[in-house]
Amino acid sequence: MVLETIWFFLWGLLWAVFFVTDGFDFGVGALSPFLAKTEKEKRVMMNAIGPLWDGNEVWLITAGGVTFAAFPLVYAVMFSSLYTALMLILFSLIIRGVSFEFRHQIESPAWKKIWDTCFFMGSVLPAILFGVAFANIFKGIPIDQDGVLQGNLFTLLNPYGLLGGVLFLLLFLEHGALWLSIRADAGLKDRSVATAQKIWPLLLAVAVIFLVATAFATPLYDNYLKNPVLFLILVATVAGLVGTKFFLNKAAYFKAWFASALTITGTTFFGVTGLYPNMFPSSLNPAYSLTAFNASSSPLTLKIMLTVIVIFIPLVIGYQIWAYTLFKDKVNDKELTY
């Protein structure tokens, strides 16, 4: 049980790291049509995340790989029941990645407009769909005893699922606006700061609505009521959200970005902790739910994987710290040359 529990929370941690790192990429892409007023500003926005986005998506691969290796049954059922949503996410990420490489290949306004649209859509859709997917997991997926979804994509687009999509989008928009406040300059920076200020109260309102709706739509609070100390996760999340606004007002944008990262991490762990030990709960019958215990790999597999992750994850973290340190300054003209 100990190994399964460790891997359950490692699984949640990897998703949280992915949302923190790739979340600001989604936010920048989603804001691109609204903040960039000139061709140079469009290039600044893409270059603000250009050296980092592919490294950030390593965490998505890692989270998916851990799901496959540590909880193969969850992987199988998740990718079959959420197939349409996950394929939409996959194709969105592909066209977003391609837009980085193709946009500058031809000096044509029409050509650049196509890839600007791909950059935007490839950022907005994953942000919303990840929120919809996780909100539905919190709520429970209508899967039967064979792990077959009794419904379709529109089944997932229920009010609580859509609320989760809006919450994730706002979290990432705030995160992206703060990143631009760090890396952009002059007018683009000022508009990014103003946008972050405008998004924050909307994010606060949606977060409160989501927390209230969670009490009625999901059983997530059961674990918290059994172990009140877990409410510290919510306290840390609220502290991150308040800290974001505090540091934003102080023009301490890097600190505000870290506070936003804490908010995203806390939001993820709020759901993961409430789910435990469920990983893919069934809304039809609790007996059909997949948990960390009935869907895990063998103890030997979990031990070997734990050894591997202890060795290699610090290397990945070290690389990303180096990359973020290297690209922490304003985007300069040299970076804008292809």
Image (tube, rainbow, N blue to C red):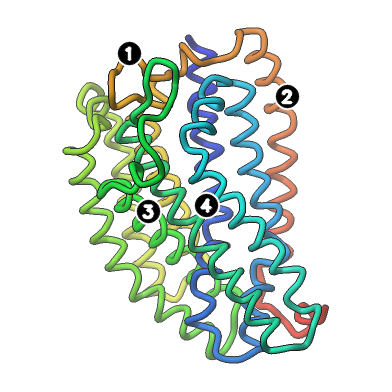
Q: CA distance from mark 4 to mark 2?
A: 23 Å
Q: Nearer the viewer, mark 1 or mark 4?
A: 1
Q: CA distance from mark 3 to mark 1?
A: 28 Å
Query: In the image, is residue 279 above or below residue 168?
Result: above
Residue 59, position in %: x, y? 63, 43
- Give the mark, 3 or 1, whose residue is nearer the N terminus: 3
What's under tag 4, amino acid-wise? Val
User: Which residue bears the numbered disc 2?
Assistant: 308
* Local secondary structure at mark 3: helix
Residue 198, position in %: x, y? 33, 76
- Give the mark, 4 or 2, whose residue is nearer the N terminus: 4
User: Which residue bears the numbered disc 1?
Assistant: 287
Callouts 1 and 4 close, C-beta under 8 Å: no
Callouts 3 and 2 close, C-beta under 8 Å: no
Callouts 1 and 2 close, C-beta under 8 Å: no
User: Which residue bears the numbered disc 3?
Assistant: 165
